[in-house]
């Protein structure tokens, strides 16, 4: 599919080190609007680091990242970008001292400055959309992992972001709960949300991904599509990785 | 239809309940017997004799009192404060009481009717009434629980425990009262006092009450003794001393009460400032900005290395000199901010302000470390989630990190408050009229060192124990909400 509009995320020749460890080496990629991009790779390959650079949770040493036309250079831009980019974490990171609904309405009220009624209405709507409307006044500690992650997705969605980032969203879940979270993510993809996902869930990759990037040791090894990936990957390293995770 | 397993379980439970029931009965029996004994003995004579005359010899004068039991108090009533160094000896003259008027019942009614001497007698009467009430209440609770066979509720057991302890203490107080709470006189003269069956009955009854209640307590899983007992005990000691030995303790307490107010004021004002200083310092310590971090770390290291007393003395004595020289230097050499220089030169800190500043600077450093540890204990993911939603650093702190950190830092902050209460005694060197300083002043006037300092120590104990309990309640509430 040809992207007529400008790409919403442009990552250009980005390098990053943590002390002496090179996490990213000259990585470039771009994500188009309404595109679902999945990044796969072994641990330590830099995929989470790359994801976290997109909303500047990590700064880059070399290169630049432009999100929705705004380069991530000064603090004002960064904050604005963060309101347009929602992130879902592996360990959920829900605020334990607030109920599920309060988790979702907090950012709306203090950043988007919405009224309490408006933000609560949106909160209830989103909880319904992720399938747990009855858990609005429940504290995160009382929810299962799958429910917590769905609340986390709703919390990120409450800010009406243009892009959603997912950092291994199902890696910390019991197998029975993975499906409920993936279903929510598939719905989001079907509705046309731009998503960048780091995951090992090959079912999701097959069902929703538009493009797949395989990373290893800090650089992109291969860029491919789901069909190509599962039938004939080009690089040897990709084949090795796939043979390990598809058992 | 019960399975064989269920049947065995229910049978064993019955057996347990049965033996539990009989052993409960036996324990209640002890308490009930004690209760009965107290009730009966209340109407028997307590003492066969009473003190009819006390002659107290001082080196300078001899003072005679016709009233039984009052040695120190009587002197004070005649307008002369007692001086312990002058005291040489006491001679007691005993005479018989008639049977009826010697009973506990008679003592109480005599105390209530005798308007003239009521103040002296009322302490004694109250003790007897306390024992009586204890016996009645324990008896009623015991009977009720015994008949229904249920285990008593925690509230009922606690009440019985406190009443039983109070009864035993009260009976000891009644005996001591005969000798005006002067243990030396008690030791010398106790053989001469004719102790009648009524007193033995009530004492034995109280002892049985206590033993019975302790046996009942043994059966429970929850401990009956709570730390509140200490608070009550210390407060009771203060009250009892002032009531039973008004000379010198009531006067001491009067004199110290202004100091108590000052101590509380200093502690509360300082604590508020310390929280602010701690928050700022803590945020400085975790900040990634090297300058802020450096300043905060320097502050903490220096202040933690100098004793609080030295810091207070420095602020009171040395700082005015520093201010003066710094101020005059500014006035002479930096005309642009000469206003600041003038202000510095003329700055006169009141003792109260100096004390608050000193305590804030010192405790603020410790509080900074507590805040730092508390904030750092909140996982990084929380800050990341907040920032990725678009919150600024301060918004994330205010709404996400600090509300969680407060639950972590509450126990150590509570500890610091209690420590602050005690360390506030150091401001007495700064001419602040707090509790310790009032104690020193009173001691300088009367040389009653033991009485004065015992009272001061007890008052501090009551304050700190109350504060500890309040902090513990706060912690409980905060953690439950989680």
Image: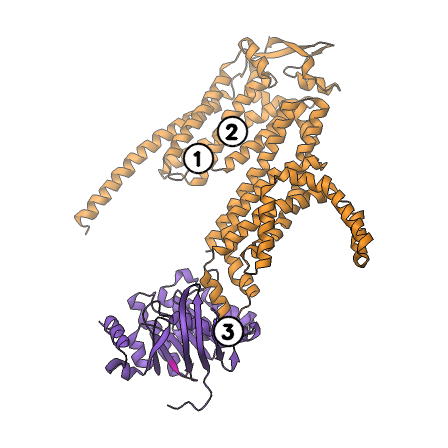
Chain colours: A purple, B orange
Range shown magenta: A31-36
Answer above or below: position of B87 versus B6: above
Q: Residues within 10 Å of mark 1 (few under 14, many from 20)?
A: some
User: Position of A133 compared to B101: left or right?
Assistant: left
Q: Residues within 10 Å of mark 3 (few under 14, many from 20)?
A: many
Return the residue at label 2.
B166
Q: Secondary structure at mark 3?
A: helix
Depth check, mark 3 against mark 1: the one in front is 3
Return the residue at label 1.
B141
Point out residue B279 in the picture as x, y percentages from the top left corner: 58, 54
Q: CA distance from mark 3 to mark 1?
A: 66 Å
User: Position of B56 compared to A201: left or right?
Assistant: right
Depth check, mark 2 against mark 3: the one in front is 3
Q: Secondary structure at mark 1?
A: helix
Indicate yes or no whether the magenta region holds residue A185. no
**Cβ atoms under marks 2 and 3 closer than 8 Å:** no
> What label does residue A82 carry, if any?
3
Q: CA distance from mark 2 to mark 1?
A: 17 Å
Provide the chain ID for the residue under circle 1: B
Q: Nearer the viewer, residue A60 or A86?
A: A60
Point out residue A39 in the picture as x, y percentages from the top left corner: 36, 76
Provide the chain ID for the residue under circle 2: B
Q: Nearer the viewer, residue B231 or B449?
A: B449
**Disc nearer the start of the sequence (2/1):** 1
User: Do marks 2 and 1 share a subunit?
Assistant: yes
């Amino acid at each position: 599919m040809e992207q007529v509009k400008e790409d919403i995320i442009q990552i250009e020749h980005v390098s990053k080190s943590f002390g002496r460890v090179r996490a990213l080496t000259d990585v470039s990629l771009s994500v188009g609007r309404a595109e679902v991009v999945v990044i796969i790779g072994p641990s330590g390959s830099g995929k989470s680091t790359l994801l976290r650079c997109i909303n500047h949770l990590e700064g880059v040493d070399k290169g630049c990242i432009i999100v929705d036309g705004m380069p991530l250079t000064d603090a004002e831009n960064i904050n604005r970008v963060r309101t347009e980019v929602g992130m879902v974490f592996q360990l959920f990171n829900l605020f334990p001292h607030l109920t599920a609904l309060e988790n979702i309405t907090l950012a709306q009220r203090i950043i988007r400055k919405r009224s309490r009624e408006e933000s609560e209405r949106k909160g209830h709507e989103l909880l319904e959309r992720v399938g747990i409307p009855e858990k609005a006044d429940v504290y995160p500690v009382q929810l299962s992992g799958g429910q917590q992650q769905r609340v986390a997705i709703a919390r990120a969605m409450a800010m009406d972001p243009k892009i959603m980032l997912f950092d291994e969203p199902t890696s910390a879940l019991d197998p029975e709960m993975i499906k409920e979270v993936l279903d929510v993510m598939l719905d989001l993809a079907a509705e046309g949300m731009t998503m960048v996902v780091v995951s090992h869930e090959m079912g999701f990759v097959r069902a929703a991904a538009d493009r797949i990037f395989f990373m290893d040791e800090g650089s992109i090894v291969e860029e491919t599509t789901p069909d190509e990936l599962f039938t004939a990957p080009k690089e040897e390293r990709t084949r090795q990785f796939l043979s390990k995770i598809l058992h | 239809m019960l399975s064989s397993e269920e049947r065995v379980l229910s049978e064993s439970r019955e057996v347990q309940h049965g033996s539990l029931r009989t052993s409960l009965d036996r324990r209640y029996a002890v308490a009930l017997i004690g209760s009965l004994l107290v009730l009966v003995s209340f109407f028997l004579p307590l003492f066969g004799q009473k003190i009819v005359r006390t002659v107290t010899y001082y080196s300078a004068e001899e003072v005679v009192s016709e009233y039984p039991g009052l040695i120190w108090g009587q002197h004070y009533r005649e307008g002369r404060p007692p001086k312990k160094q002058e005291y040489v000896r006491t001679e007691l003259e005993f005479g018989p009481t008639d049977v009826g008027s010697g009973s506990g019942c008679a003592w109480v009614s005599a105390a209530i009717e005798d308007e003239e001497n009521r103040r002296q007698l009322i302490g004694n009467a109250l003790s007897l009434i306390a024992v009586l009430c204890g016996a009645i209440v324990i008896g009623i609770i015991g009977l009720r629980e015994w008949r229904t066979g249920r285990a008593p509720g925690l509230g009922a057991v606690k009440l019985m425990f406190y009443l039983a302890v109070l009864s035993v203490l009260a009976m000891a107080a009644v005996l001591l009262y005969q000798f005006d709470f002067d243990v030396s006189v008690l030791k010398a003269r106790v053989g001469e006092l004719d102790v009648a069956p009524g007193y033995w009955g009530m004492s034995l009854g109280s002892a049985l009450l206590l033993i019975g209640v302790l046996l009942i307590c043994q059966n429970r899983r929850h401990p009956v003794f709570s730390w509140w007992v200490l608070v009550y005990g210390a407060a009771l000691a203060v009250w009892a001393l002032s009531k039973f030995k008004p000379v010198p303790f009531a006067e001491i307490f009067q004199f110290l009460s202004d100091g108590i107010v000052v101590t509380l004021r200093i502690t509360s004002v300082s604590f508020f400032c310390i929280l602010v200083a701690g928050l700022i310092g803590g945020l400085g310590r975790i900040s990634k900005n090297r300058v802020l971090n450096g300043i905060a770390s320097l502050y903490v290291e220096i202040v933690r290395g100098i004793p609080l007393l030295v810091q207070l003395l420095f602020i009171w004595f040395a700082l005015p000199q520093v201010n003066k020289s710094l101020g005059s230097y500014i006035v002479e050499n930096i005309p642009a901010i000469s206003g600041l220089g003038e202000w510095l030169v003329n700055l006169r800190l009141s003792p109260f302000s100096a004390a608050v500043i000193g305590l804030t600077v010192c405790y603020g450093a410790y509080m900074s470390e507590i805040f730092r540890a508390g904030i750092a204990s909140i996982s990084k993911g929380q800050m990341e989630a907040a920032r990725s939603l678009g919150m600024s650093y301060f918004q994330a702190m205010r709404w996400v990190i600090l509300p969680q950190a407060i639950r972590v830092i509450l126990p150590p902050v509570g500890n610091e408050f209690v420590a602050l209460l005690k360390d506030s005694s150091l401001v007495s060197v700064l001419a602040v009229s707090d509790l310790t300083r009032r104690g020193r002043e009173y001691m300088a006037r009367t040389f009653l060192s033991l009485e004065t300092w015992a009272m001061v120590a007890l008052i501090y104990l009551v304050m700190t124990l109350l504060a500890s309990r309040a902090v513990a309640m706060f912690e409980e509430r905060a953690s439950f909400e989680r």
